[in-house]
Amino acid sequence: MSERILLLGSGGRECAIAWKISQSPELEKLFIAPGNGGTDSYGENIAISPLDFQAIEKFVSEQDIDMIVVGNEDPLVAGIYDYFASRSNAPLIVGPSKMGAALEGSKDFAKQFMARHGIPTAAYRSFTAETVAEGEKFLETLRPPYVLKADGLAAGKGVLIIDSLEEAKSSLREMLGGMFGASSATVVIEQFLKGIECSVFVLTDGNGGYRILPVAKDYKRIGEGDTGLNTGGMGAVSPVAFADAEWMQKVEERIVRPTVEGLKAEGIVYRGFIFLGLIDVDGEPMVIEYNVRMGDPETEVVMLRIGSDLVPLLRAAASGDLGELPLEIDARYATTVMVVSGGYPGSYPKGKVITGAAEAPRGSVWFHAGTSKNAAGELVTSGGRVIACSAYGDTLTEALEASYAGANAIDFDGKYFRRDIGSDLKAIEEGL
Ligand code: AMP
Ligand code: GLY
């Protein structure tokens, strides 16, 4: 096979997927739309928005694209799968249908799906402006902290965790009153779960076939010791000490299989990645959320640990039959440390010239996230998260040392990174 592939997205996640795809002997040509200042090392960047389906369709037909790999959730929630499903000569698409994408696009839909299939998750109820009084009463029955979630996509900001009952009630009213626009017209209130989180990724063919990819943990807060504002993710590690074989067996039996089989049984077309945001509650895995794409920056460690050629796996999933294709996993550790613009996740400057990012040493890969090239051809910052310094190691410590060597070597005005990525897991591994 010689595949012509179009990858949609522009973050560190897409850079990592592009890196992995580019190693495939089955690849003829990779395009990334729109890509970033690093993806052009692995393919050709194309200035098309992932949401401009007509432009994508035109490009696909002109370039004879065999397969579209959708990196970010927006085109999936907007229905890119369904758009192409009705076309003749459509390319294969790695990603769910619009209905499947509602697992991420609507928290209420996801909670109902889990309830129908007995998948362990926090108890919840959903409320709208008409039922705000009931929502306030429901809050009174819960113990703090209170978890309030905008039903729809809110760029990762739609979850509030609040200690005081009065504040939770007023936030509920504000959310229903349009705090997150239409996304919070419905609000899910759920039981607070206490535990450590991790991310499990599944590639499914929509027909009951699936492969579980390496498990990862990400670090969402801007500040060390998990303090400060939430970000897209400041770093990630894989594997995750507490997600051992026994725990992962529970995940597979109680969560992965019922999810994959539930989608099939309900006739929801889903050929792509499922991201399970899980929490370990006293040894038992529960679902915090579904996403319908890979995680960022988890992908920047997961791709390092996939030993097999990814292209045949993607093609098989998108064709509806993973068959017996093996998924080999690299036994080494992989870590990534995200170098970000000062000010992120608030406002930050762009266009800062980046130095020291030319070549990662052996055993490290630097995935660009928010970079571009300026008119002079220099590499400059163009986003909050700038470069993910990923590395392998025989131990977690070794991998982290290499990631931090990268984070120190790369430089630009206002650079910031967290210095404690993976330190909680190191403590678990060392039995501290
Ligand atoms: P989500 O967007 O659903 O992933 O929520 C964002 C973050 O809020 C999660 O990664 C958790 O850290 C936290 N969170 C969400 N739901 C709960 C819950 N029921 N209990 C405790 N923490 C939660
Ligand atoms: N790292 C979490 C996410 O991609 O949503």
Image (cartoon, rainbow, N blue to C red):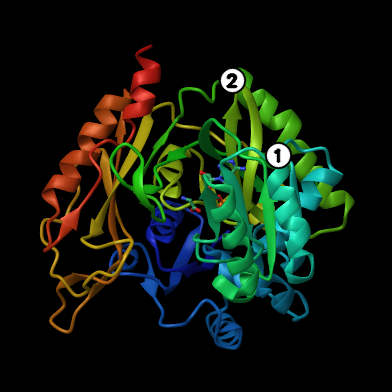
Quarter-of-image position of residue 33: bottom left
Q: Amino acid at mark 2?
A: Ala
Q: Position of residue 268 (x, y in %)?
A: 81, 59
Is residue 7 something that shows in the picture?
yes
Residue drawn at x 49%, y 61% as measured from the top left: 157
Residue drawn at x 47%, y 65% as measured from the top left: 28
Q: Is residue 135 left or right of residue 242?
A: right
Where's the C terminus, which quadrant?
A: top left
Mark 2 burial class by Cα count in 10 Å: few <14, some 14-19, many 20+: few
Q: Position of residue 165 (x, y in %)?
A: 59, 48
Mark 1 burial class by Cα count in 10 Å: few <14, some 14-19, many 20+: many
Examine the rendered structure and indicate whether residue 131 appears above or below residue 114.
below
Q: Position of residue 207 (x, y in %)?
A: 80, 49
Q: Secondary structure at mark 2?
A: helix
Quarter-of-image position of residue 38: bottom left
Q: Is residue 253 left or right of residue 211?
A: right
Is residue 321 something that shows in the picture?
no
The residue most toward the top is 431
Examine the rendered structure and indicate whether residue 269 appears above or below residue 116.
below
Q: Which sits in the foreground, 423 or 82? A: 423
Work out how far the residue at label 2 is from the one at label 1, CA to CA, in angstroms.
21 Å
In the picture of the structure, the residue carrying the numbered disc 2 is 245
Where's the N terminus, which quadrant?
A: bottom right
Task: Count the labels in the image.
Answer: 2
- Mark 2 / mark 1, whichever is N-terminal: 1
Residue drawn at x 41%, y 82% as measured from the top left: 47
Q: Secondary structure at mark 1?
A: loop
Q: Which sits in the foreground, 227 or 69? A: 227
Give the numbered dot on residue 121. 1
Q: Position of residue 382 (x, y in %)?
A: 27, 72
Q: Amino acid at mark 1?
A: Thr
